[in-house]
Amino acid sequence: MSETGALVEQKREGMKVLIVDDEKLARDRLRELVGEIGEYVVVGEAMNGSEAIAQTMRLNPDVLLMDIRMPGMDGLEAAMHLMGLETPPGVIFTTAYDQHALDAFEVNAVDYLLKPIRKDRLAKALSKAGRFTLQQLHEINQAQDTPMTRTHLSVHLRGNIRLVPVQDVLYFLADNKYVTVRTASEEHLIEDSLVNLEREFGESFLRIHRNALVATPYIIGIEKDGSATWQVALKGLDKRLAVSRRHAAAVRRWARR
Amino acid sequence: MKDSTSYFLPDFGSFGMAARILVLAEAIAVIFTIALNTRVGITAGRDFLFLSAYTLAIALVSLLFLRIASKSIRRLSAIRGSFVVIGLLLIAIVIVTEGMIAAFYSLHVIPVRWPAWQMTVLVHSLLIGTIVMLLGLRHLFVSHKAQVDAKLEQEARIQALQSRIRPHFLFNSMNSIASLTRSDPPRAEAALQDLADLFRVLLADARKLVPISAEQEISRQYLEIEKLRLGDRLQVHWTVSNVPRNALIPALTLQPLLENAIYHGIEPRFGGGTVKVELWADNTETLNILISNPVPEIRKHAHGRGNKIAMDNIRQRLASHFFEAATLQTFEEGDQYYVKIKMPIMKNQGDRYLSGIPR
């Protein structure tokens, strides 16, 4: 028992920490506190979720100290994307206040630190920084006063994370286990279900077929082809997407609005 | 589930309700004994015993009915439930009255089975029962409403307090100050002083009117603290023209609007942005406040409740001082979000705004 403990201690020595916060003073404070605790090395800083992912790819930190509320991609979303890595880093969230989310943190045993951050708490959290599941993160998100919807989708390629902004997506096409994500210039495969995607991004996507969700901002036309089925034309896309008979009424209703 | 704020009927099967109904029945017996007798005596005693027996019998039968029906009543709306309750009472009155007359006849207290006064007694009892029951339901309604109002008022107070002190701002500021105590102690000290001044105002009575210059000052201190956190991401542009410095506005009109603008408009933006504040007077009567902020590039969150609470709170306080003469509008134009307030210029603390209000 004690031998494995010593082994863990040794591994923690020189553990690499990435600090993620949009406020400079908050980052400064964390950097200083981590320095005082010793044993850990701050390898970098990031100002929001997308930067945190890019830095994680580049610097391969062991643990992230990450604020939740940040401009652009926030901390919860970044952690969700990182969970797709083969060996994701540990994440300790830092937050000022959100009573409901904090309850969810407790329930899901996800580490968090309250601002202003205390050195002893930080040291304790770092010493046991754990990993968690996507499900836990989703539950915390749902508990927030205003749950966020992801700004990006993550595509995992050979240990890398490729981020696709949701606002660039033209459509989602389901095929067995995977969903094809189509942007103006690229196509990716993600592991998700249309039902989930529709639930999360339903405000800007329209179901036109059992296996297809299209981004409403890109719709430029809804037309009938020779065989009397409806088709949707999307900006920047030559091919047309077929509307199934079951969804035709809903699509036309949307078009009238 | 029923909307508990408008559903006023109690659980008629409960013991408390039974006790209340029995006491009410006895009270009716007492009232009628007094009404029928000018003197205390044998007759009065007999009337009292008889009336008590009669009203208590009705009460007990009603209670039995209510007890059986209480579950079904709770499934109905409050209005329908009330009709059912009255209906059950009336049935109980008919049963008890008819039963009593039948019993008197078989015990030879009265000579005929269908006395001439039978109809009169029945109609009187039904009328009295209906009136008492309506009063009773009215009482239940009023006392329930009083309870709900008290609860709502308490919730409103808590919300008002929370709309004034956004915990997110408080704790983030403290974190900034904690950071500064090491790197830049003089700035930490200044920030603490600003925070203290701001909280003194936040904790003071928000119903009073203050000179606009004081509100500008507290807003400036607030913005200093936000600038600590947000740095160059926060730019504030003030345009103040021909506004009398001593014009009075409700305390905490400007500051919460700035806080909203920053929380919803600046913080979620990667590059930050500019909050514009314009204050000007139309002739000498109307004060205008226009605050604008850029809307975030990406809207990750549904519109928060916090924003609405703050707006409602300011609207209420404006209305309590200026009635319809003050307005607060919010609108989006291009990529900017605007809050516009118009209010009469008032310079004397003592008198409330009176001119131009239809009475």
Image: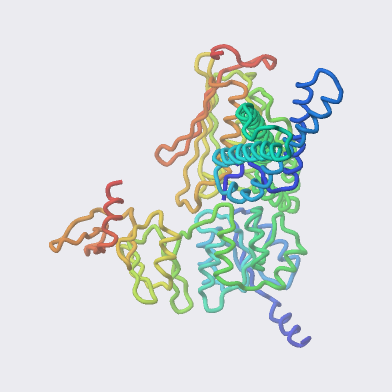
> In the rendered view, would you say B245 is above or below B87?
above
Q: Is residue B282 left or right of residue B217?
A: left
Q: Nearer the viewer, residue A18 or A151?
A: A151
For the C terminus of chain B, the image quarter is: top right
Q: Is residue B183 left or right of residue B238?
A: right
Q: Nearer the viewer, residue A180 or B290?
A: A180
Q: Is residue B173 visible?
A: yes
> In the rendered view, would you say B350 is above or below A10?
above
Residue B141's quadrant in the figure?
top right
Q: Is residue A150 left or right of residue B148?
A: left
Count every numbered label the image shows and give the total. Answer: 0
Give residue B157's position: percent from left, percent from top: 68, 37
Residue B55's quadrant in the figure?
top right
Q: Is residue B252 visible?
A: no
Give residue A95's position: percent from left, percent from top: 65, 57
The residue located at (38%, 54%) in the rendering is A204
Give residue B195's position: percent from left, percent from top: 72, 40
> In the rendered view, would you say B58 is above or below B185?
above
Give residue B76's position: percent from left, percent from top: 55, 46
> In the rendered view, would you say A210 is above or below B159?
below
| Residue furthest right as drawn | B41
The residue located at (62%, 33%) in the rendering is B114
The residue located at (67%, 57%) in the rendering is A28
The residue located at (67%, 30%) in the rendering is B132
